Each structure stands twice: as C-alpha cells, then as structure tokens.
Amino acid sequence: MSKCKYIPLLITTMLLTSCGKMPYACFTVSEKEDSVPVNKPVIFNAYCSDNAKEYFWSFPNDSVAYTAIVTYTFREIGKKKVSLMVGNGNKSRYSFKELNVVP
C-alpha cells in the first residue's frame, strides 16, 4: 500500500487543527467605569469573550488572575488600567479598560 494516499489526510488534518477560531476578548465591570469606588470589591466578568479557554487578567500593583470571573479591590484613587488576554491554544486576543477609581 502506498504511503502517498495518506498525504491528503495528513494535510487536511493539519489544516483543520491550525484553522481554529480566533478568540475574542471582552469583559464587563460590575461598577460604572468612570466612577469605580476605592476599597470596594469590583467584579470583572469575561464570559462575553468568544472561543476563549484561557484567561489572563492584569491589574494595578502587578496583580494577576487566571479565571473568567475575578474580584479585585482598588486601593488607590485615579485612572487604573485593567487588561484581559484570552487564548485557545496558540491564538490569543487582548482587551483593556481604563477605569476611574474615586473616593
């Protein structure tokens, strides 16, 4: 039996596994983004992200988290950046929001 007959199957398999859908990074915040209260837990929810299997959050003060839903408490007032990277294997997408933390 010829090995050449397996080449189309191999090529098809490679194409299907490399053509997975690109993830989409999206998240919501439990407080108004322009007036997040200092010293109050805020919930960040990434379930609006599509095709995501992994989550990587980045918060001020080098805090990180790895789940779809995260609670974080801001300890200082001012503009604060929160970012989310979602992935599904070797593809990833990034999103961020600038929040205004108030007294």
Image: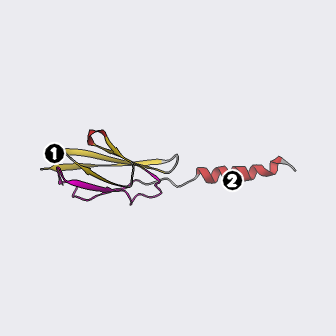
- Expressed as whole percent of the image width and height from the top left, the position of residue 41 reads 23, 54
Query: Could you say which is closer to the camera, residue 94 or residue 76?
Result: 76
Q: Main secondary structure of the magenta part?
A: loop
- Expressed as whole percent of the image width and height from the top left, the position of residue 1 reads 87, 50
Look at the numbered disc 2 and give the secondary structure of its residue. helix
Query: Could you say which is closer to the camera, residue 73 or residue 33?
Result: 73
The residue type indicated by label 2 comes to Thr
- Expressed as whole percent of the image width and height from the top left, the position of residue 99 reads 23, 50
Look at the numbered disc 1 and give the secondary structure of its residue. loop
What segment carries the magenta color? 25-54
Q: Residue furthest left?
A: 103
Q: Residue at x 52, y 55 (%)?
A: 21
Q: Residue furthest right?
A: 1
The numbered mark at residue 12 is 2
Q: Residue at x 70, y 50 (%)?
A: 11
The residue wearing badge 1 is 77
> Quick check: marks 1 and 2 in contact, CB under 8 Å?
no
Residue 66 lies in the magenta stretch: no
Q: Which quadrant holds residue 69?
A: bottom left
- Expressed as whole percent of the image width and height from the top left, the position of residue 61 reads 26, 39
The residue type indicated by label 1 comes to Ile
In the image, taking residue 56 as reference, residue 97 lies left or right, namely left
In the image, taking residue 74 as reference, residue 27 lies left or right, namely right
